[in-house]
Image (spheres, rainbow, N blue to C red):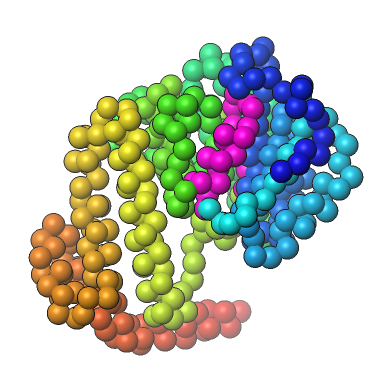
């Protein structure tokens, strides 16, 4: 880890209450060599003065870290810049939690290595937070839909969070959120601790944490150009093997998220209510995990037969994918033909 600009002696202690709070922008990158320079330009362009920027590579397999170093080689601007790289890949949850521990800011602004923050992003988020008495623990903004080459297609407006006052609100209607537009207070980590290292998406976890504490608010202003097809984007599957791999990966990710939500609910004293809420999804994920274990066809069929708390359609699909995936080959062949015909249409 090294500091590009600024001085450690100029950084306030964590949690110090300033008229204009110190903000830490946490820019995380992984295998984003093509886009990370643009993301860095957006971070460096911030108009907010009391800002440190931590740019961290999660052990990328491509030239992401070299691109980061090149982009910062001649920087001499006003912001304190910290550049670092993980020795091994630890995933989004672990990466952001690690940077939160290293950061000095009272407010932590998330930035992805393939998105671009508007120059006024940090300033607008701070102003919105101060206007709400510094009470909310999460501030979310709108985004702009951007493709791989930088074309903008329109505004993305996630669920407005101001009306979510308690757990029952979140449980009744899970909000649609995009973590790439979020800012959090340090208080969330002080109370709940680090996220699990293998947590693949922090969006819902941090939103729930905020709802259970100081609340969450939304700023109806697009402050991030959100790149299509990023790490959390949807994938197209060209073969049955790809689909099976996706099912198993999604199952693993789902089980980790459920464990994190339950852990945070336990900390907040609502563990029993969360357990009841998550029970159907947990049963589904545990069944999916069991049916793909290398235990033989007979045991997989038995697992499907016993899983009465899981829908029959899901049980049948997972069973066929696990013991006889070839039955889906014609379906993927048809999708490929249809995709080619659409691509050839004028």
Q: Is residue 100 magenta?
A: yes
**Is residue 310 shown left or right of residue 95?**
left
In this rendering, the count of numbered labels is 0
**Residue at image coords 25%, 81%:** 323
Q: Is residue 3 above or below residue 199?
A: above
**Residue at image coords 25%, 30%:** 270
Closer to the camera in the image, 328 or 57? 57
Give the magenta-colored segment's residue range: 91-113
Q: Position of residue 42 (x, y in %)?
A: 74, 43
**Is residue 304 shown left or right of residue 140?**
left
**Is residue 301 shown left or right of residue 82?**
left
**Residue at image coords 31%, 34%:** 265
Q: Position of residue 224 (x, y in %)?
A: 64, 42
Q: Is residue 337 above or below residue 191?
A: below
**Is residue 4 shown left or right of residue 85?**
right
Closer to the camera in the image, 109 or 194? 194
Q: Toward which corner of the image does residue 275 lie, by quadrant?
A: top left
Closer to the camera in the image, 126 or 259? 259
Q: Position of residue 260 (x, y in %)?
A: 36, 43
Q: Is residue 95 visible?
A: yes
Q: Toward which corner of the image does residue 25 lie, by quadrant?
A: top right
**Residue at image coords 43%, 21%:** 214
Locate the C terminus and report the quarter of the image it occupies.
bottom right
Locate the N terminus and report the quarter of the image it occupies.
top right
Q: Is residue 232 above or below residue 177?
A: below
Closer to the camera in the image, 139 or 274? 274
Q: Is residue 170 visible?
A: no
Q: Position of residue 299 (x, y in %)?
A: 16, 75
């Amino acid at each position: 880890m090294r500091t590009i600009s600024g001085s450690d002696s100029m950084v306030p202690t964590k949690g110090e209450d300033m008229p204009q709070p110190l903000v830490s922008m946490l820019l995380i990158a992984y295998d984003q060599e093509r886009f990370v320079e643009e993301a860095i330009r957006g971070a460096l362009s911030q108009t907010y003065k009391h800002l440190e920027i931590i740019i961290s590579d999660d052990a990328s397999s491509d030239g992401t870290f070299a691109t980061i170093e090149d982009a910062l080689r001649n920087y001499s601007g006003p912001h304190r810049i910290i550049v670092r790289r993980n020795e091994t890949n630890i995933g989004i949850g672990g990466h952001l939690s690690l940077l939160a521990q290293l950061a000095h800011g009272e407010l932590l602004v998330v930035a992805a290595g393939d998105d671009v923050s508007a120059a006024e992003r940090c300033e607008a988020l701070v102003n919105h937070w101060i206007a709400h008495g510094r009470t909310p623990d999460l501030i979310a903004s709108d985004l702009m839909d951007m493709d791989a080459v930088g074309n903008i297609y329109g505004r993305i407006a996630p669920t407005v969070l101001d009306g979510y006052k308690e757990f029952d609100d979140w449980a009744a209607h899970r909000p649609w959120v995009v973590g790439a537009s979020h800012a959090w207070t340090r208080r969330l980590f002080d109370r709940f601790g680090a996220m699990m290292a293998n947590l693949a998406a922090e969006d819902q976890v941090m939103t729930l944490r905020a709802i259970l504490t100081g609340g969450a608010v939304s700023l109806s202003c697009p402050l991030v150009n959100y790149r299509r097809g990023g790490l959390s984007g949807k994938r197209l599957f060209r073969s049955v093997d790809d689909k099976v791999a996706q099912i198993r990966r999604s199952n693993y990710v789902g089980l980790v998220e459920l464990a994190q939500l339950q852990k945070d609910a336990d900390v907040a004293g609502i563990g029993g209510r969360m357990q009841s809420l998550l029970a159907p999804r947990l049963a589904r994920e545990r069944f999916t995990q069991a049916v793909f274990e290398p235990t033989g066809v007979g045991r997989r069929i038995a697992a499907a037969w016993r899983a009465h708390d899981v829908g029959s359609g899901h049980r049948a699909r997972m069973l066929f994918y696990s013991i006889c995936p070839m039955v889906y080959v014609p379906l993927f062949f048809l999708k490929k033909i249809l995709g080619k015909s659409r691509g050839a249409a004028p």
